[in-house]
Image (spheres, rainbow, N blue to C red):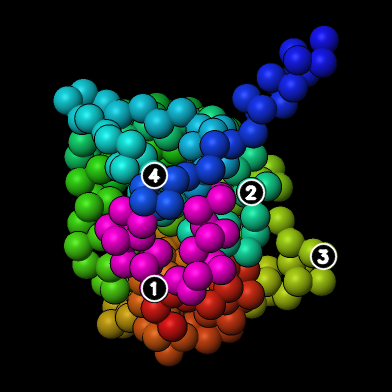
Amino acid sequence: MLSDWWRRLVSGAPQPIAADAWQCAVDRLPWVAALDAPRSARLAHLAAVFLHRKTITPVGDLQLSDEDRIALAALCCLPLLEFGEEGLHGWSQLIVYPDAFRVNRTHVDAAGVMHEWEDELIGEAWDSGPLVLSWADVQADIAEPDAGFCVAVHEMVHKIDALDGVVDGTPPLPRAWQSAWARDFQSAYNGFVARVDAGADVEIDAYAAEAPEEFFAVCSEYHFSAPAVLRQALPTVAAHLERLYGRSPFA
Ligand SMILES: [Zn+2]
């Protein structure tokens, strides 16, 4: 009995990532290389929990080595450095396509007419379903780490946003912070959308104007990869994100 219990306990605990394997991930990922030692160690633990709880499934011809999987887990856990492993709740699979992938969309409009179209995506986060990434686009982010893009962070932010049951650009936070967040993000989002609609030259990827949840996800990419641009363009948003994620590795 005791040995069964013990075995279950042991198999239920994440396997720590070996120091040399972690160093390999650090060397590959500029955002991780820029973390100080305590935060790098915390990320290594989060990545180990990620690998323990999530299945990583490559699609088609794509093959992922152990080092690739550790790097993916580390990237996905970057937004959880302060939030913690509770941010991994509610889903179990990371699907990795070799490149951008096509999905069929349908929508029934108010008049009852069905619209169908195809989208080409580099990442997707299903409600309580898998997180999907394009490996080629993850590599492109790594090759240009300060360009304001990080698709793995973007999709993970949708997962964090969804933790309170609604994907609306507001993650679960202590009540007072959440109301300040909702107020500040709404006002920043409205201002951003107005500028995009007016054809202004915006500093942040205009995709952020699609919806409040995309605004949250896109601004989070800038927090990690181009924090100075975000602080300049949207200082109140930058301050909330710094509180949620901690200091940007590139600050
Ligand atoms: Zn998105």
Q: In the figure, residue 67 lies in which quadrant?
A: top left
Amino acid type, callout 2: Glu
Please say if 231 is above or below 9.
Answer: below
Which sits earlier in the primary sequence, circle 4 or circle 2? Answer: 4
Please say if 165 is above or below 25.
Answer: above
Classify the position of the N terminus by image quarter: top right
The answer to whether the residue bearing label 3 lies less than 8 angstroms from the nearest atom of ligand 1 is no
Q: Residues within 10 Å of mark 3 (few under 14, many from 20)?
A: few
Q: CA distance from mark 4 to mark 2?
A: 16 Å
Q: Main secondary structure of the magenta part?
A: helix
Amino acid type, callout 1: Ala
Q: CA distance from mark 4 to mark 3?
A: 34 Å
> Residue 85 bears which disc, if any?
2
Q: Nearer the viewer, residue 242 or 210?
A: 242
Which sits earlier in the primary sequence, circle 1 or circle 3? Answer: 1
Residue appearing at x 65%, y 55% in the figure? 84
> Residue 34 bears which disc, if any?
1
Q: Which residue is mark 3?
A: 175
Residue appearing at x 20%, y 46% in the figure? 136
Q: CA distance from mark 1 to mark 4?
A: 17 Å
| Contact flag, marks 4 and 3 (Cβ < 8 Å) | no
